[in-house]
Amino acid sequence: MKQIDTKELQNQLQAFVNDTVYVHLETTNGAYAAHHNEGFLSAGVFLRNGRIQVERATIKGDGPYRIGIKLPEGWLYAEGLTHFEKTPTQLLIAGLNAEGRLAVALQLSRQPFGDQNKGVDAND
């Protein structure tokens, strides 16, 4: 992955406007911090293969960056983004902490992401 260039990434985001796409959104702080402080509140989110209609997508900030994606009935928002990579079918955007560990991931794809059965069962 390379560091975000806002003009380049904005152009990549524009390619998804007016399309229905799959989204992967993930945040984490607990996996890297909870073992250092027992009182630390571990928080995170994991969404894989959610389908969204992209009406508008914008990157803002001076770094780390934030991206807002306008949906027909709301918004998807991610902040703390630092790096990105474009593949033939996906746009992968990540926020890496000072140690290079993942803090946030926002990924867009016209095809479902693989490994649909991987994740955490909320009933466990």
Image (cartoon, rainbow, N blue to C red):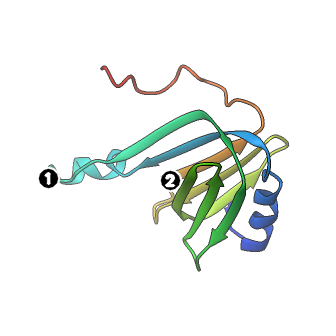
Quadrant in which residue 9 is drawn: bottom right
Quadrant in which residue 14 is drawn: bottom right
Name the mark on residue 104. 2
Within 10 Å of disc 1 (Cα), the crowding (few <14, some 14-19, many 20+) is few
Residue type (three-letter) at the residue carrying disc 1: Gly
Toward the left, the furthest residue is 39
Q: Nearer the viewer, residue 99 or 6?
A: 6
Estimate the x, y position of residue 112 in percent, counting from the top left. Answer: 70, 29
In the structure shown, which secondary structural element does the residue marked by tag 1 occupy? loop
Name the mark on residue 39. 1
| Residue at mark 2 to residue at mark 1: CA–CA distance | 22 Å
Residue type (three-letter) at the residue carrying disc 2: Val
> Where 24 falls versus 112 (above or below)?
below
Name the mark on residue 110. none
> Where 7 falls versus 51 (above or below)?
below
Q: Nearer the viewer, residue 124 or 34?
A: 124
